Image (cartoon, coloured by chain):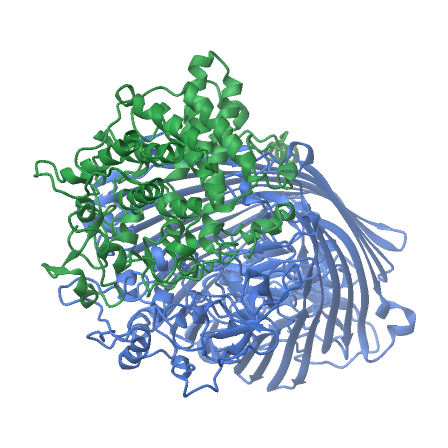
Chain colours: A green, B blue
Amino acid sequence: MKTYKYLFLLIGISIMGCSDLEEEPVGLLAPESFFATLEDVQTAVNGSYGHMSHRYFMSREMSMPLMLRSDMVELNEFVTNAERVQFDQIEVLADNASIAQYWPKVYQIIGAANQAIAGAEIVGGDPSEVNPIVAQARFARAFAYFHLVRQFGDIPYLDAPVTDIQAAATISKTPAADVYANIIADLEFCQEWLPETQSAASIPAKAAAESYLSLVYLTLGDYQNAYNYSKMVIDNEGAYGLGLEPDFQNLFNDNEEASPEPIFEIDFSSVTDGDQGRNYQGPYTGIRANEKYDDGGGWSVEVPSMAVYDTWNDQDYRKSVSFDPTGVFGGEVHSYEDFTDFYTAGVNRPHIAKFSRYGGLQGGNNRGNEQNYIMMRYAEVLLIAAESLNELSPGSTEAEGYVNRVRARARNGAAGSTPGVFPPNVSGLTQVQFREVVLDDRRIELAFEFKRWYDIARRKIGPEVFSAAGLEGYRAFDPNKDYLFPLPVNELVRNPNLLPQNPGY
Amino acid sequence: MNLKTKLILMLGLIFNLSLFAQDGYQLSGTVTDATNMPVPGVNVHVDKTQKGTATDFDGVYQLDVTSGDILHFSYLGYVTQTITVSNQKELNVVLVEDASELDEVVVIGYGTQKKSDITGAVSSVKAAELTAYPTSNAEQALQGRAAGVVVQSNNGGEPGAPIAIKIRGNTSISASSNPLIVVDGFVGATMPQAGDIQSMEVLKDASATAIYGSRGSNGVVLVTTKKGRAGKLSIEINTSYSLQNVTDHLDLLNADQFADYQTIINPDYVQGPADTDWQDLLYQTGSISNTQASFSGGSDDINFYASTNYFKQDGVVINSDFETLTFLSNVDAQVTDKLKLGMNMFGSRSNKEGVPTQSTGDTANGGGDDVVSLMFRFMPDLPVQNADGTNSTNTIGDNIDNPYAVATEAVNETTTDRFRANLYADWDIVEGLNFRSTFGFSTLNQTVGTFRPSTLIITDGGLGGKATIDQLTTTNVLSENYITYNTELWKGNLTLLGGYSYQKETTERFSAGATGFISNSFSFHNLGGSEVSLIPTSSLVVQEIQSQFGRLNYDWDDKYLFTATVRRDGASNFAKNEKYAIFPSGAVGWKLSNENFLKDNQSISNLKLRASYGVTGNQAIDAYESFAKLSTLFTVIDDVVVGAVVPDQAANDNLKWESSYQTNLGLDLGMFHNRVSLSFDYYNIDTKDLLLADESQPEYLGFLTLASIRNVGEINNKGYEISLNTINITNENFTWSTNFNWSTNKNTVVSLINGIDVFQNAAPGYFSVARTHVLREGEAVGVFWGYDYQGVYQGGALPEGTAVFKGAQAGDPLFSDLADENGVTDGVITTNDQQIIGDPNPNWNFGFTNTFTYKNFDLNIFFQGTYGGEVFNLTDVQLFNGDSNATTEVLDAWTPDNTDTDIPRVVGSRGREISSRFVEDGSYVRLKNLAVGYTFPSDLVEKMGIDNLRLTVSGQNLLTFTKYSGLDPEVSYFGSGGESGGDSNTMQGFDFGNYPTIRSVNLSLNLRF
């Protein structure tokens, strides 16, 4: 019997586990089960906004090419990173590390939007409740594709969540014209369904859809539609709660949320999750070793050429808002001419101030800056209206009025100060003169706001602005190549159907 | 177990043979080893009878015998002695450690087998080899000890760094090529301390590993811990202390040289106020102290072994240390004649206080989170602290902290608790039929705390300090039950095994963090004392494996051996339709030396041929990889954190097992009474359905996980292994024996999805490099990718077939110009000019040990080396970049007056290009261990009540022969550029920022009483 006692013990410990091996993930989100309510759809839309605040998008990797490739921002000559040098010197290679980083991020914005749109179909419901949320997703998608198509031309285009990887991995490029058509279709849907106002400018409202439609059409040279949509915004500025911020400086401040001017923004707060939500514009544009903002100083990476500063009229209030010509070192204020006395590898030029002067809780070289990035603001809408109207019917006082409204705000200077005389109102210009004035007003008004390179590419003025007489001196600009960036080389390896590479790369 | 005796046979006393028989009488004697130490527990057995006994603790036995009886003296790890009794009353025997290991019983999966009967490829490593020099874990002690086994630290000489073991190359290209570790039958256990290990068996071919089915494809390491023996209580104390230094310093510029160098780049450069040798400041003399105390003993029915071990290492880089305290006990009880019960228990706590090394370059801009690369990069003309008391930071290049500040102020603390218990019951049901059941449990609790104070401005510290705590709890429950049936069948022995196994692993993670601390004094112990909490995260992962397995062993007439194994495994990790797989294997062996034509051969004592074929699997992927997945994403709207989800990965209904199809051909040869024994193996492994985080998946798909796990293709590994043991000289006072093992491995990527190259990037994020490694059909795994350096451009027309970067001047680097897809070469570098520029896979590895004993002295010399692997010196890429300190080689840079050089001109803005300029030969031969031991004469120490007293002085890594110009050819920077992370078999051979390899001198004392 004794043995049997132990035998029972044996059997006892040996009976253990018989499983069907089904995985039952707790805490894991599956697309099929996640979408139950409209709040869930909004949560998915929020994902696309979240991706926009990652370092790999406007905070750093995509904004740096846009800034450096323009004629308004140069790279500190002691900064060695090849991917930056390549954009600054217009010698981009197809394995450029910035492109490699932001390309997937832009598509993640699109992927998140596609997921939200598909989620809305699962949830269903009254179109008047569903579509305004879907419209946010379609806006995010259009916004992302608009960046891509301007930079790369023909691109892979996906408008639904990927379920069959093998199929999606072998698609061919969609021609730029079709991409634009899709962007327009998305934005038209947004224009129909987005509400007139939202709680924050980081959520698109009707004005965001119309503003972007006007900019898309302006980019395509369809001035009639560009004018129509910008006019819609202007005509509805009351209903949309829009207007120009009286004090230009207040746009570049962590309190800009209160301003009526921003139409679409990327939101930053001092709370981040690694590079998710971290603000790099302050560090990249700020003065190295500067004690002025108690943030450890910036990194002096993106610094405008001296010509940008020198050619900018000193009486223009926007110049003082846009630039920091002095820093504080060792407790004393010093002019930009002495910056390298305090940091050898710095740059003795005025630095961009739009991202670092008022950033709320800063720190970490300004990475804790709470200031949102304005992607579209009312002043740009006025300038789009002016530019497009000038192409349709030159010499109109209406077009002059839009330009002068922006100029008047600049003249008004800081809140409570006496208005200045610069920039004067425009009137009586020829179509060509007016076209140049508006383009240059965009350069000044929207300086360092990621707009200039797109203007150069849109107006095809590369050889002119990168000539010896340009703001940055001569750059070997090849109009047959350099208006487009190279598709990331690894992506062409992964999907050879994306070939050919853009010309010249 | 001491080092000195190996492979010698001596009879203590030889008595005359008697020609006539006598009646039974009592024979007695003492069994000792070659060092004259009594060997307790030796089995003394009279041939063809049930009669037998065992030696007591003093090695003494008594046995009733009849003259003419044949006695076998056998003990695990020693050569069995067979002696015919011839009337003598006393028979003393000296047992010698088994050179040929032929009759050694070795542990195989779910059983044991005589070494001579094994048909697969199995290497055994002895306790003495594992404890030849102090190591923080037994994996480290395996290096160079077994053919075909490559051991490498994941982070140089870092105290507490994980150790990677690779058996027969990278059979997998997924995250894990680590073998399965089985400790006393517990599958997937943590390795115990080397001092507690009785033996280690490395199962290499499919015949040996197929019994572990889906987890066998990377090989299996079977560990048997020490057990108690009947006899008096034995107490053993082993203690050692060693002093350590780095093997080498980089020859960097001093402050004056540096200022001159920077002035070339920036004429306005102002030399800093100091002359700091950061290597001197950061390196220190490290130390290891290791003490193990064990006691063991037992009665006829119960025996036990219990041990504790305390290991403490102060690293050679300041503020990096590791300590671990372990406990291990084994209790075995013979409950009835037929039933044996027992339990193994293991517990440990380890605490690692590290300095940040192996920069990812992702957490901080410019990779300022890595003290090792900072030590080399950081400006030598800056002091540790500025005049105002703040830490100095680089004033050229990226804004990075000085390494001293990072090493002393950043906190990285890992506390790990492990516990394992394994209960077994072993029941001899009837003669030949045995049932064994094990039930085990293991748990791991790990807390990783980090803190970056606000004084470190770039390491996220500017926000008032940042602290994080990551908590991980893993529990494993394992139940295994199997029946073994052993019978004679015709002229042979048949052994059948059948069993069932179930294992469940539960992993819970939790992490929290905060920034903006009101004080820098909290470290990570007061997350509440902060302004801002980071988003906490948590997760639960459950994985299950259930299996049935069986094995048949049959030997016919001790000449022909057959083994067949099958295991059916199911794992929850795989897709719905791919959960189960069957892993079969078969092997044959032919003992030629037992054939009549060789039986009486005087020189050949053993000759065996082996052949095996089988399939094993790899399920080492994370759970839930086959699901479509959404992930939460940190998102702010209107300065308020809101809920957000994004697509993370697509569903993969076809995700399935990676399977290895392995052929092994082997030969075992023993000559001159096995004084020379040779093993030779050839293997060929085809690994199909490779699991890989698939970077060939386009990134425009929009998933957060850019490279999800897929079955991507096939690789082949093939190679030879030779193991040669010889006893060169053996006489009364002097012995010399040699152990040599040598192995080759050649791997080839056979196929990839659609034949598309998979490019990978192993450089840290701030290098901004897109690709450094490639997987390409027909090439070795993970070859280097970049430009082919052709020396310095001397200006004027480009030499034929070369190109430069756009805008290059004389003195800039020159590269090979490859034709683009239109066949055009234009002298300007584009990405079309990149190509394969090196191969990190070594052609062969070897270990070479010589052991000498002279009277009570012994000497052990162990060389280890590798040949043919290339190293990419990423450190040099950084140091020649112009934005950091440089090696003195830069003094020979090209200038108009110094054109005959291979080093391009000094510039401040050269991209960190990956080119063959930085590819070097990584071959080396290293004196891994040199040890001199002295065993005190037993008659001397016995007066003090001591059974054994031994002193050893040893040195590790005392000599290294290599052409590699960097710090050390044993490199281990595993790529973690951008958002990817972790080690990877496909991104080997990069030297950057890893903790330096150490050289040490060690004194150890072994005491038993």
Residue at 30% x, 46% y is A440
B829 sits to left or right of B325: right
Total residue callouts: 0
Placement of the C terminus of chain B among the 4 image quadrants: bottom left
Placement of A40 over or under A343, stated as above or below = above
Give the answer, above or below, for where B462 lies relative to B237.
above
Which residue is at the front of the view, B82 or B992? B992
Image quarter hosting the N terminus of chain B: bottom right
Which residue is outermost to the right? B597
> Residue drawn at (63%, 40%), measured in percent from left and top?
A171
Residue B377 spot, x, y in % from top left = 35, 69
Q: Residue B753 location in percent, x, y?
A: 68, 48
Camera-nearest residue between B992 and B489: B992
Residue B268 in picture, x, y percent from top left: 24, 74
Q: Going by the image, does B134 lie left or right of B665?
A: left
Query: Which corner quadrant of the image does residue A218 belong to?
Result: top left
For the residue pair B691 and B598, the one nearer the viewer reads as: B691
The answer to whether residue B110 shows anywhere in this view is: no
Tell whether B410 sits left or right of B10: left
Q: Where residue B806 sits in the image (x, y, percent)?
A: 48, 67
Q: Residue at x 53, y 35 (%)?
A: A179
Which residue is the extreme one toward the top?
A126
One can see residue A430 in this view:
yes
Quarter where residue B601 is shown: bottom right
